[in-house]
Image (cartoon, helix red, strand yellow):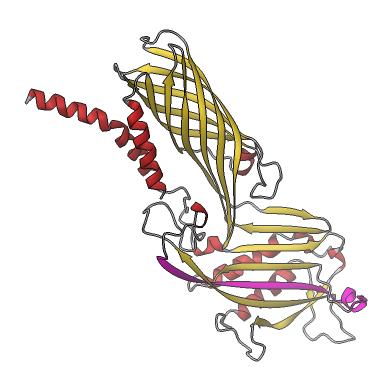
Amino acid sequence: MKTDFKRNGKIWRKYLPVLFLFALMLSFTSCYTDYGLTTADYDVVITQYDKNTDFGVFKTFSLVDSVFHITGDTTESDSDLLTRKYDKLILSTIRENMINYGYTEIKDPSDQNEPAVVIVVRALGTQIDQYYYGGYYPGWGYPGWGYPGWGWGGYYPGYVGKSTYYVGTLFIDYFDVAASENDLDGKLVAPWYATINGLLQSGQSESRLTGTVNQAFEQSPYLKVK
Amino acid sequence: MRMKYLIIALMFLSVNIFAQDFLGVLSYNTALPMGKTGDYISDFSWKGFSFEGRSFTNRNWSFGGIFGWNIFDAKITDLIQIDNGDKGITVKGTQLRYVNSFPIMATGHYYFGKRKNSLRPYLGLGVGTYYIIQRFDIGVFRREVSNWHFGLAPEAGVLVALSRNTSLILSVKYNYAFSAGKAVYGSTDNSQSYLGFNIGLAFAGY
């Protein structure tokens, strides 16, 4: 018994480095921690403004009363991927933010009653197919929509699956009416615009839409009427 | 594939552990990001390891090689402000930032004191490359760059004898990867650096 025990001890010592390394590797679980992101974490709000524009001089606005759904096919009026369910919510949230920033809304604009700013909202739905390779190295962290062929320069161990996700993009354009009328090339001048991008998924859509539209205005304090 | 490389490297290492005057070192590595790496990710890294072989040429000098892996990551929700001439751009979204650094280096070490001492401080230098992958995720967008950097890694450490063949090894290593390619955020200065705090086991061979 004593001899066996000694022998086992030697074997144990011999494999200690291997066990040590495995313990280390297991402790990593992933080289790309996914941080357990929620759908809302995939929302991005981008705003851009023209630094030469004095936004303080604009005091009135009109909101085009529907959201344009951008489709590849011009004969189709609606996108398959987007619902019209949230159009009113989007427009009312923008209206609220503009009024909070001190703008006065002109509901029935005419040549005699022209707003300083016209806001146009467009929406685009995009389907993205993502091929991923999983199952070979469990725990090495492939997010569902991961980078194809991660590592190993073009060596693909084989298709394992495909995931499809839908991305929605909302464009809010803020047109300067006077500048657009005076533009020599006849272009519309938008000194500010916001692009909101996120996953199209059921659940929390209302709060995500109002949250991101509010965020677009919050991160653009220069829009406030002086 | 990656597992295969690790196993091959491990086999190489275990052969050498039993060779003469050889030290096989397995380390758990933590790291403090510095310089450009720290600007991109300031969070301390608790994820890293390395394995190393050191062959003694005399009582005080060893030469060998090291392969390591350090992982840095951070979740950031701050606004990004970009100045683009007449345009001011602001971006809000959850950002995931990652840096994976793989040092592959030749090393030289000088040990103070006698071989049988239970405590042996040493100084070392690694010269070689870092393969560094930088990734930036925001929303459904991803940007990733990877580059091979020339690098230097000065090191100070100590071997603490646990038994005749096994030592605890503690070391501090400054990792500096010279600029190569472009950083993931577009900068042409893509030098990377971090201070590693390492703890491991060293196995002596006969």
**Residue found at the very far bottom of the displayed protein:** A75
Residue numbers of the magenta segment:
A159-185
Q: Is residue A169 magenta?
A: yes
Residue A226: image x %, image y %? 84, 62
Assign the C terminus of chain B to one quadrant of the image: top left
**Residue found at the very far left of the displayed protein:** A1
- In which quadrant of the rendered view does residue A160 lie? bottom left
**Residue found at the very far top of the displayed protein:** B114
| Count of residue discs | 0
Residue A224: image x %, image y %? 78, 63
Q: Does the magenta stretch include residue A21?
A: no
The answer to whether A137 is drawn above or below residue B119 in the figure is: below
The answer to whether A57 is drawn above or below residue A13 in the figure is: below
Could you tell me which residue is drawn at 65 percent across and 66 percent down?
A: A214
Residue B92: image x %, image y %? 64, 58
Q: Taking B104 as reference, is A221 left or right? A: right
Residue B24: image x %, image y %? 38, 26
Q: Taking B32 as reference, is A10 left or right? A: left
The answer to whether B39 is drawn above or below residue A56 in the figure is: above
Between A67 and B190, the one lying in front of the other is: B190
Could you tell me which residue is drawn at 74 percent across and 58 percent down?
A: B89
Between B29 and A7, the one lying in front of the other is: A7
